[in-house]
Each structure stands twice: as structure tokens, then as C-alpha cells.
Image (cartoon, grey):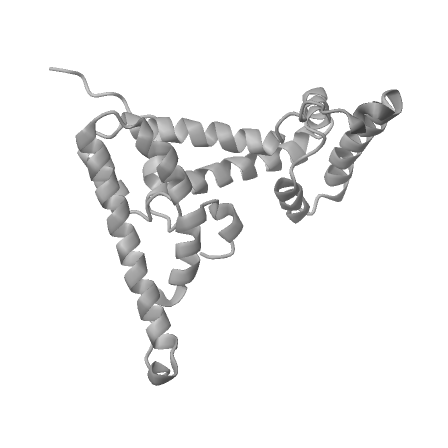
Amino acid sequence: MARKSEKHSPYFNLTDAFKVQHCPICYLARRSVTHYLDGLLYERVTDPGTVASVRASEGFCEHHFRQIIEFQDATGLSALARYALEFLVQKLTQDPKTLRKKAAPPALCPACKTWNETEASYIGLFLENLEDPSFMFDYEHSFGFCMPHFKMIYPKIENETHREKLLKTQIAKMESLIKELADFERKHSYEHQGESYGKEADSRFRAVEFLKGRSDKFHERK
């Protein structure tokens, strides 16, 4: 008899993420980035590795710089911005013509790199557990994957039965959202102003997240 694979913390992280009302991959990637930035600001701002990575990427992308601002660590933000600016001053001083050259783009934002690594890791984990009935049951009763992550996962599934089942689940979730949106619009109309809202009350926010992903931009919605 084949021995069942041992479950480790990433497996349980993913199944726990099925219980939140967000795309589980977006949720876990957001959490990973938050932990990374928190640790960086708390104890690694002056680490040579941090300085090198921030210089190589010319800082963080706009989104993650704004997320760093939310931590309200004034000196940490100051140091990170200074590293990037010092590098750019050095680069432009040494070669002013660089602005007219088609130079290679800077390295990926360190927080985006963390996002991408987490994303790839959990997508791989999901694909490894397609034949686990309990795992798939939990997924089918979750928020589901946002369309960007669904489009990343679907082509990687080699088994046609698994692929068809995942597609069927995705379409069912979309149809459910369509119904909720229609109910919201109906109840929002003048003729139905007195009718109370149910779960469709926040359907428009969930629909945008389902379509475009990145639940980190919807963190204010519980």
C-alpha cells in the first residue's frame, strides 16, 4: 500500500487560507510580504544584504513602498529610500548618458520577489494535492482562485478530469457572483429600496477581487 505523504505546515497554511474570504494564493502572498517587510523594518534595515537588494532594485515598487509607509517606521523608510537614492546618484554621476541608453531594467522589487516566490510555492502545493478529496472539498467551498491565479494554475494541470473539475468549480463560483451582483443591483434600485441586503451587500468588492486578484489591495474588507 502506498504511504500517504506527510502533511507539513505549508499544507495547513493553504487549507486554512481556504477559510478566508479571499483568493487563498493572494491571501498567503500578502501575508508573506507583510511578514517580510515587518522583519526587514524591525531588524534588517541596515543589513548589508538589504542594502544590496534595495540598491539593485532601485528601491521598492510604488505599491510596496506605500505598504512600508503604513508600518509608520519613519527611520526605516528613510533608510530604504536613502539607499536607493544614493545608488541612483552614484549611477547617474558615473554615467550621465545612462538615461539615453536602453539599459537593462533594475532587479525586481524585494517585496515583489517575496510575493512571487510565495505564489509559486503555494500553486505548486495546490497542484500536488489535486487527488486529495478532503483538500479539494475545502477548496471547492472556499472563495476560490482569482482569475489571474486560476489562469496560472489551469494550464499546469495535466490530468483532464482534474482540469475539467477545476473549471467547473470556477464557473460555478462566477455564476454565483453574477447572481449576487444582480440581486444587489435589484435591491439598490428605487423600486426595492426597502428590501434588506444579504450576502450580496459586498458582492461588488468580491467580484473585483475575483476578476483582478491581489487581495492585499482589499485588506480593509474583513
Q: Quadrant of residue 134?
A: top left
Q: Is residue 104 left or right of residue 127?
A: right
Residue located at (71% from left, 30% from top): 45
Image quarter of the N terminus: top left
Q: Is residue 118 left or right of residue 20?
A: right
Q: Quadrant of residue 3?
A: top left
Image quarter of the C terminus: bottom left
Q: Disc count in the image?
A: 0
Q: Nearer the viewer, residue 178 or 12?
A: 178
Whether residue 15 is situated above or below residue 95 in the rendered picture: below
Q: Position of residue 82 (x, y in %)?
A: 80, 34
Q: Position of residue 115 (x, y in %)?
A: 51, 33
Q: Position of residue 167 (x, y in %)?
A: 25, 41
Q: Quadrant of residue 157?
A: top left
Q: Position of residue 42 (x, y in %)?
A: 66, 35
Q: Nearer the viewer, residue 155 or 221?
A: 155
Residue located at (37% from left, 48% from top): 20
Could one spot residue 198 in this view of the protein? no
Q: Nearer the viewer, residue 130 or 134?
A: 130
- State the residue lying farthest toward the right: 93
